[in-house]
Image: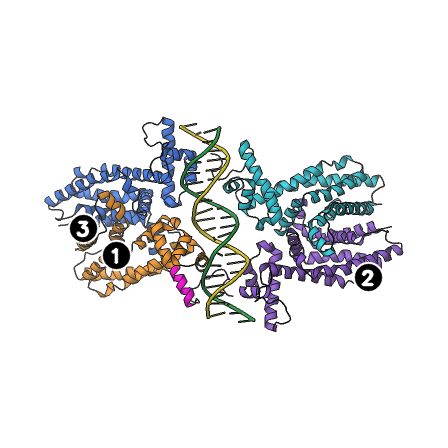
Chain colours: A cyan, B purple, C orange, D blue, E green, F yellow
Amino acid sequence: MAASSTTIRAQGELSARARATRQRILDAALVEFAEKGMAGSRVDEIAARAGANKRMLYAYFGSKEELWLTVLERAYAAKREEERELSVDSLPPLEAMVRLVAFNLRYTSRHPEFVALLNQENLHRAAYLSRSEHVPALYSPMLEALTTVLARGAAAGIFRDGVDAMQLYISILALGHFYVANRHTLSTIFGTPLDTEAAIAAREAHISDFVLGYLRP
Amino acid sequence: MAASSTTIRAQGELSARARATRQRILDAALVEFAEKGMAGSRVDEIAARAGANKRMLYAYFGSKEELWLTVLERAYAAKREEERELSVDSLPPLEAMVRLVAFNLRYTSRHPEFVALLNQENLHRAAYLSRSEHVPALYSPMLEALTTVLARGAAAGIFRDGVDAMQLYISILALGHFYVANRHTLSTIFGTPLDTEAAIAAREAHISDFVLGYLRP
Amino acid sequence: MAASSTTIRAQGELSARARATRQRILDAALVEFAEKGMAGSRVDEIAARAGANKRMLYAYFGSKEELWLTVLERAYAAKREEERELSVDSLPPLEAMVRLVAFNLRYTSRHPEFVALLNQENLHRAAYLSRSEHVPALYSPMLEALTTVLARGAAAGIFRDGVDAMQLYISILALGHFYVANRHTLSTIFGTPLDTEAAIAAREAHISDFVLGYLRP
Amino acid sequence: MAASSTTIRAQGELSARARATRQRILDAALVEFAEKGMAGSRVDEIAARAGANKRMLYAYFGSKEELWLTVLERAYAAKREEERELSVDSLPPLEAMVRLVAFNLRYTSRHPEFVALLNQENLHRAAYLSRSEHVPALYSPMLEALTTVLARGAAAGIFRDGVDAMQLYISILALGHFYVANRHTLSTIFGTPLDTEAAIAAREAHISDFVLGYLRP
DNA sequence: TATGAATGAGCCTTCATTCAT
DNA sequence: AATGAATGAAGGCTCATTCAT
């Protein structure tokens, strides 16, 4: 009777069955939230999609807002985990950079739900994310790795000096993320579809050129 | 979504008083929509903020969705109007490029509500914007102008050859827009505020370098 | 647009139609609250009984709790108004006392909903009533009048000296109110119905005797 | 409301451990019910407070309503047990009366939860109590004892003749119970706290006087 | 042109109760 | 004897929209 009988929070103590239900709710919430945003999502719909009782959603997550935060944290963690596996700091500088750029475009392209979550959360002025204890910690290793790559490249004479790692990382994110995030309005404006494989490959080529072109000494 | 027979759409036929009311509703809606998104905004709140009766909102715009589209169109038009005034095609290529890059960052920074609207609309998969007859037409002149600038720069030997105008334009938008759009989550992640004047100036310097560095032959 | 468009509070500014709706809601709420208490009452039921839309209940009263307080205040005011009309301070002391005692029994008997409201509110530890600005003011005149009557009776040699007006008033309330409030459990316990006219008349005779017997010098 | 076939009602057949659990549930329910009434109480909360699994509550009591009735019966029995120990019929009439009056005030004052239960049950029109087989039987001895005391006092010339025992008993209950039951609203109305020890002592003095003053021949 | 009042559907949340182990 | 997980039916409250004047 340690936890109040109406809310279950810690995940460790759960049975396999409970964990499965919890997971189905999270999966369903990710889809729903990404599609309709937080305000536009319906708790009923999430529960139905999860094949779970609505009450369990509240038992596991307490409220729609807590559920949102949990989904958001997991989305960040998932992306960082894949990015970490690139092992940029163990690759030659040029390849590291190319891979990082391509990965960011391709990941956002494969995971438009991640983009949708981020946009929503920025509408909220990061009100939920700023309550997270996990996410900020995920990103300092990335910055360190990028700093190292830039230094190695500069030492080897293939990158320019004095590049700010955070600015560059934001730019790399921007070149991919913005394209995916705004693909619908951009397609409308430019009158050409942007989410075909051909279009994405073209984009990848462009931004690779873009970053490497800039980094030339 | 056909306009009801009692809906008043054209603005020309309105009296001065009516036009003022209509305008106040639009202004209020812009603020409210940008702050809370479309699903999160309340028709009551918009009317109250406009000092207008809710009924008038329906008389002038027919529905919340139509109001959203009108607000969105005006936001696009306002930005394009300022951008047009840059007269990039009458400036020397280098200066044109610097100005265009700086303008896009500064405009989005000064108009976070524009960013918020765009993000929302992309969540909607541009469902409203794609019904607009005005917006696409706004952007073809921009692409033409940029194409000309790139050609002039290449001819003068200061820009590389073979740059795709649309890709570059998207990249320029991305470098500024993404920074502003995601400033809240980025601030949280990197643990440093990104919307101070100093931070924005640093960003401007970085992206100017970035674009010009890339464009070097 | 003085009042927010979603909540209407002051009663003075309302149209006749609105006032009628508001009143129907109050009447329905009184019945429902008295029958089932606050926690047991259903907002849907109140609205239905009032022939009003649920939304109006919230427009006029803001919440179930505010509605409860309003109903409570009106119940107190109604009783005090009738009590005031007894004009105890302009009657001979003995008659004043008899009338006051009888009135309190009869009123609570005729208005079991008043008793029910009071009991509920005491369960709440007067949480709502204590936010009322109106009710306490109603009762000081009563105490003053009773003090005068006691003094006049004592001076005339028909009442004992040194009677505390507040204690006596509470006792008078008690002798009638408790009987009515607990008529159901008392009937069960003593195995005899207590809310027949005959039983009430007997009770009236008893408590008249009781009070006057005590007041003898 | 018939006990389900799996419900365990009789207490005799239970093991010591089971009896302890059952008792903890009853204790917790008393507190919760008294604080929030039946409609306002939560089965979850009662189980949590008892340190028991919710399921056990249903195993032992069948439903929230049955639990309510059990709690109510026990509260009545506890009061009558203490009252019985006064042995009013073996005391001199005057002292018996004084003790009875004081006891009723003091008991309700020490046991506000009893008062709260009674009020709730009267809101229910004694719907649950009337199904009890135990409670009515508790009270006939009380009336007999009081009748005897009154007769002895009248014979001794210290009490008036013709006093109805039930009416008097109700009045004695009223003078104490009403004060305690309504202490919150009365405190609010009269602007003075009524549950201090001093206030209760003053009340005790008043109602002693009151009853004895009335009983004078 | 403008307004106050009304509406019905739907949303987030909570409840008493039962199932399976 | 005890438990964790699950459920269906509300419950309070809010929303975009329309009516009547």
Residue D138 placement, left or right of D30: left
User: Which amino acid type is shown beneath numbered disc 3?
Assistant: Gly
Is there a contact, CB below 8 Å, between mark 3 and mark 2? no
Location of mark 2 (residue): B89
Foreground of the two, C140 or D51: D51
On what subunit does the disc labeled 3 rest? D
Q: Nearer the viewer, mark 1 or mark 2?
A: 2
Q: Is residue B22 left or right of residue A189?
A: left
Tally of marks: 3
- Distance from the alpha carbon under mark 3 to that under mark 1: 21 Å
Badge 1 element:
helix
Q: Which residue was labeled with disc 3?
A: D213
Q: Position of residue D146 (x, y in %)?
A: 18, 42
Residue bounds of the magenta highlight = C1-24
**Which image quadrant for residue D67?**
top left
Residue A36 drawn above or below residue D74? below
**On the same chain: label 3 and label 1?**
no
Dominant SS type (magenta): loop
Closer to the eye: label 3 or 1: 1
Question: For the point 15% across and 50% down, which residue is it?
Answer: D216
Residue that sits furthest to the bottom in the current view: B15
Between residue E17 and residue D44, name the one nearer to us.
E17
CA gap, disc 3 to disc 2? 108 Å
The amino acid sitting under disc 2 is: Asp
Residue B17 percent across, percent down from the top left? 59, 72
Check disc 1 and report the residue beneath it: C104
Task: Give the percent coordinates (x, y) of residue A6.
Answer: 48, 39
The C terminus of chain C sits in image quarter: bottom left
